[in-house]
Image (cartoon, helix red, strand yellow):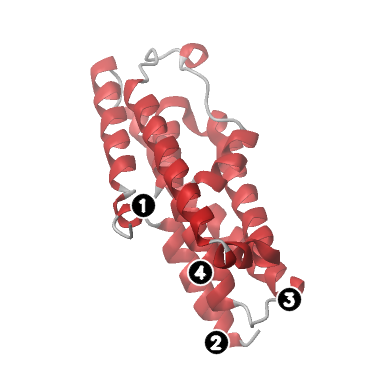
């Protein structure tokens, strides 16, 4: 890979990782509800799951969806349905203020890892990373390089949202404020689906 291609890839990684999307909005909500320490497995699952997703797509999944485009449509529909369910769960969450042991159960590492496969933005990012930034045909070497670069930039990018959510705990000191915040996050999560739905 040339220096210019790597620089372009790093910029794409930063912009796509740090802008609002299902992962970042969920991490922000989790940071506000559970704090940084309890949300770290969630954040780690996002990074590891997405990095692995790029590798799998680069090694063959992209060609599969090109051959069977209807499969991608079905996956998108299932993803949207699941994200709407998650938005409902976030909006209706009502943890008790000031008691970390009763603040619900945060998303686990494995759940966050698996979630990447039903995250429309993650699919878009991964497919773009492989098709645009790897020399074609994409060899395993270039696929791994792209995935490692993405993972290295993805971690600090999503951490910004987690820290922001945790800092908001100082304001979310009443049940009504936290409930309002959760519904706002749920609404933004639904709105994040608009670019995906606009394609269909």
Occupied quadrant, residue 90: top left
- The tag on residue 4 is 2
Q: Nearer the viewer, residue 53 or 198?
A: 198
* Neighbours of disc 4 within 10 Å: few (<14), some (14-19), many (20+): some
Q: Tell which circle, 2 or 3, labels the residue nearer the N-terminal end.
A: 2
Residue corresponding to mark 4:
128
| Tally of numbered tags | 4
Q: Which mark is residue 147?
A: none
Q: Residues within 10 Å of mark 3 (few under 14, many from 20)?
A: few
Residue in view at x 45 percent, y 32 percent: 30
Counting residues from the start of the chain, the first of labels 2 and 1 encountered is 2
* Disc 3 target residue: 139
> Residue at 52% of width from left, 13% of height from top?
101
Helix, strand or loop for disc 4: helix
Disc 2 crowd, CA 10 A, few/some/many (<14, 14-19, 20+): few
Position of residue 50 relative to residue 148, above or below, is above
Residue 174's quadrant in the figure?
Answer: top left
Q: Give the residue displayed 55% in from the left and 41% down from the top.
A: 115
Q: Quick one: quadrant of the N terminus? A: bottom right
Locate residue 119, reporting x and y percent.
Answer: 48, 47
Distance of label 2 from label 3 (alpha carbons): 19 Å
Residue 20: which numbered mark, if any? 1
- Counting from the top left corner in percent of width and height, residue 106 is at 52, 26
| Spatial separation of the CA atoms under disc 4 and disc 2 | 17 Å
What is the secondary structure assignment of the residue under circle 2? helix
Helix, strand, or loop for circle 1?
Answer: loop
- Which label sits in the foreground, 1 or 4? 4
Earlier residue among tags 4 and 3: 4
Q: Earlier in the sequence, mark 1 or mark 3?
A: 1
Taking depth in this image into account, of 99 and 60 the one nearest to the observer is 60
> Are circles 1 and 4 on residues that touch, CB within 8 Å?
no
Picture residue at 44% right of the left edge, 36% below the top: 82
């Amino acid at each position: 890979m040339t220096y210019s291609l790597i620089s372009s890839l790093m910029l794409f990684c930063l912009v796509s990782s740090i802008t609002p999307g299902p992962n970042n909005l969920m991490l922000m909500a989790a940071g506000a509800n559970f704090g940084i320490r309890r949300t770290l497995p969630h954040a780690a699952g996002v990074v590891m799951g997405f990095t692995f997703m790029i590798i799998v797509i680069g090694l063959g999944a992209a060609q599969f969806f090109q051959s069977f485009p209807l499969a991608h449509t079905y996956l998108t529909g299932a993803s949207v349905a699941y994200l709407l369910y998650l938005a409902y769960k976030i909006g209706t969450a009502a943890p008790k203020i000031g008691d970390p042991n009763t603040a619900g159960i945060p998303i686990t590492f494995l759940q966050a890892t698996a979630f990447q496969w039903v995250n429309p933005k993650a699919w878009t990012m991964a497919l773009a990373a492989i098709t645009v930034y790897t020399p074609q045909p994409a060899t395993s070497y270039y696929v791994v390089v792209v995935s490692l670069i993405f993972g290295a930039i993805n971690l600090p990018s999503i951490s910004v949202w987690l820290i922001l959510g945790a800092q908001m705990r100082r304001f979310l000191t009443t049940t009504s404020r936290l409930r309002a915040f959760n519904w706002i996050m749920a609404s933004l999560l639904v709105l994040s689906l608009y670019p995906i739905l606009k394609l269909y």
